[in-house]
Image (spheres, rainbow, N blue to C red):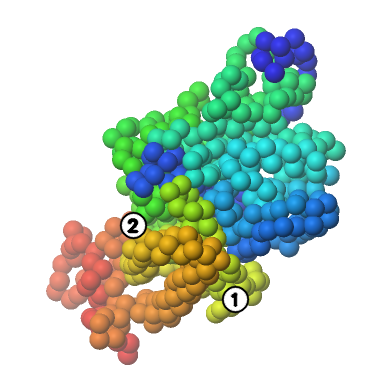
Amino acid sequence: MSLSIVAAVAFALAPPPPVTVDETDACTSIMVGRAATADGSTMITYSADAPFMPKLLRHEGGPKEEGATFDVVAWEDDRAAGPIRQVARTHGVVGLMNDRQVAIGETTTGGRRELRNPDGLLDYDALIWLALQRAATAREAIDVIDALCAEYGYRSGGETFAIADPDEVWVMELIGKGKGVNGIVWVAARVPDDALTVSANMSRITTFPTDDPENWRSADDVVEFAIEKGYFTPGGAPFSFRDAYHPDASAVSKRVCGARVWSIHRRACPSTEFPVDFHRGVEGAADGPLFVRPERKLTVTDVLALMRDHYEGTPYDMTRGVSAGPFGAPVRFRGLTFEVDGEKYAWERPIATQQAGFVMLAQCRSWLPDPIGGVYWYAPDDPSTTPFAPLHCGIAALPEAYATGRYDRFSWDSAWWIANLVSNLAYDRWSRVFPDVEAARDELEASALALLPAVDQAAAALHEKDERLARRFLTDWAVGNADRQFERWRDLATTLLTKHVDGYVKDEKGRGRGVGYSEEWLRRVVAEEGDRLRLPPAPNEPPNPAADPATPDAPSSGSPDRSG
C-alpha cells in the first residue's frame, strides 16, 4: 500500500513511551555482499551474546510426514514451542545454515514493548530454526518467516535478521503486533553486492522506497499499522520504520549499539572519517549509513577480525585506561551502566565480548554444490579467545565436543567450557596471556583455511559421482578438524595455567619469573596510593622524587623471584 493511500486512514493516537534495549540482548551481525568479498562468497556473522550455553544443533532434512504436528526446540534453551504442522520435505541444517546454503543470524532490537505477543508460539530462535528447514533462498526465508508468524504468532520483541544465500544478503527488521495478535510488521533490504551492513541491537532501517521490490520488501501493512497505533502521522516527515517501531533515542542505546556499527564502518573504510557524535549521544546527530562499501575486498579472516573488535586504536580502545586494569583487559563486566555520586556512566560495549555464547560466520559460495559451498565457521564463547571451526553445511554429524555440556556444570569434554576456561585465564592478565592465546588461535584458523581448497576440490569430485560419499568425506574432515582444534584448546588451557601461575611467567626452561606491572599502571598507582606505598630513603641517601617507577622487566626482588 502506498503512503498516499494509507495517509487517508490516519488516527490521532498518542504513542506509548518507547522501550530501551535490554543490555543482555547484545548481539552483533555483519552482512557482506558477494562483490565485497575476496572470493565472491556472501558472508554473514552472528554473535549470540547472553548468559547461557547455546546448543550446536543439526537437523536431518528429507521427506517428512506432511501435516503431522511436532514441537520445535531451538538452540537457546530446551523450551518447546508447538504444536507446529510439518511440511512434506525439509532441508538439513547445521547450526544456523541449511544445506541449500541459506543462513540466518540475528540481533535483538527490542522496540515497543506493547507490541510483544506473549500468546505467540514462536520465539525468535524457534522461528529461525523453522525457517532454515523450509527455505531454499534468502527471499524465500523472508516469506517463510512472515507466514510462520501469521500462522503461529511471534512472542519475542523486535529483531533484526541477517539472511544470506550464495547470491544475495538481506537485512530484515521485524516486530510483533501486540498481545493476542498473530503476525509481524517488517521491512527487508537487499544488501548491495559491493557493500556491507551492520546491526547491533538497534534498528537501522529508517525511510525506504516502496516501489523497488528487487531490493526492498515490506509487510503490506507496515505503514498502515503504524498509523493505526498512533506511531506515525502522514503529512509530515516520511515514514521511518525505526522511528515508528523502535523510537529509542537514549544515550545508553546509542553508546552501546551505535559504537559497534561505527567501529565496523571505520575498519572497513579506514580512509573515511565517520562521525562519532551519534554514538556519543550528541543531540540531533545523524546515524551512520545503512550500507558502506569496503575499501578492499574482505576475506574470511578479515571478517572474523571485525568480530574480534574492542575499538583498538581509537579513543575508545578498551585495552587502555584505568578501566582496563593493570594488564589492559578489554573486558567490562555487566551491567553496562553505573552511577557514582549522582552522575551516570556507561562502559564501552565491544563487538567481541566475554558474554558471547557462540559466534558464527556463514560463508555461502555459489560456484560449489550446496552441501560443499556452505561453510559454517563456529566458535563457542568469546571470538577473540577462541578459534573458529569450519563445518560444511552438508555434513551428516556434529563434532561431539561442540554439542556437549551444561551451563551449570563444568566439563573437560565440552568445547564451550574449555573455550571459557581459556578466555577466563586470559581476562585477568590479558597483556601477558592473550598473546599466547592469539598465536594458537590464528595458527588453527590458518591451518583450516589452507586445507579448505583441497577439501572442497576433493568433495566436489566425489559429489559428481556420489553425493552421499561426498557428504561422508566432508563429515569426516570437518568433525576430525574440529576434534583436533578442541584437543589443542584443552592442551592450551593447561599450558596457560602452568606458564602463567601465581603472577609469574615461566621462561623456556620452566623457571618462574616476575613480570611486574607496566610503567603506565605504576604511575596510576603512585598517583593514588603513593604516600602509603613510598619507601623512606636509605640512610645517607637523599630522596629522589624524580625517580621513575620500576619497569615490568625489573622486579625488585630479582629474577627469578624467590620468597624467604
Direction bottom: furthest residue:
564
Seen from the viewer's position, the closer of residues 438 and 450 is: 450
Q: Quick one: quadrant of the N terminus?
A: top right
Where's residue 38, x and y in %?
34, 46
Where's residue 280, x and y in %?
46, 35
**Callout 1, which amino acid?**
Phe
Is residue 107 shown left or right of residue 368?
right
Identify the residue at horizontal 72%, vertical 14% (top origin). 6
Identify the residue at horizontal 32%, vertical 60% (top origin). 521
Q: Is residue 296 above or below residue 462?
A: above
Identify the residue at horizontal 52%, vertical 68% (top origin). 469
Tell which tag, 1 or 2, sits nearer the viewer. Answer: 1
Q: Could one spot residue 305 in this view of the protein?
A: no
Compute the Cα span from label 1 to label 2.
37 Å
Name the N-terminal-most of marks 1 and 2.
1
Is residue 114 shown left or right of residue 279?
right
Identify the residue at horizontal 69%, vertical 22% (top origin). 223
Where's residue 324, x and y in %?
41, 56
**Callout 2, which amino acid?**
Arg
Where's residue 314, x and y in %?
34, 44
Q: Quick one: quadrant of the C terminus?
A: bottom left
> According to the image, label 2 marks what residue?
524
Say which element carries label 2: helix
Seen from the viewer's position, the closer of residues 4 and 19 is: 4
Q: Which mark is residue 410?
A: 1
The 10 Å Cα crowd at callout 1, few under 14, some 14 to 19, many 20 or more, is some
Say which element carries label 1: loop
Q: Is residue 510 above or below residue 217?
A: below
Seen from the viewer's position, the closer of residues 560 and 2 is: 2
Q: Could one spot residue 547 in this view of the protein?
A: yes
Q: Is residue 192 above or below residue 526?
A: above
Direction front: furthest residue:
465
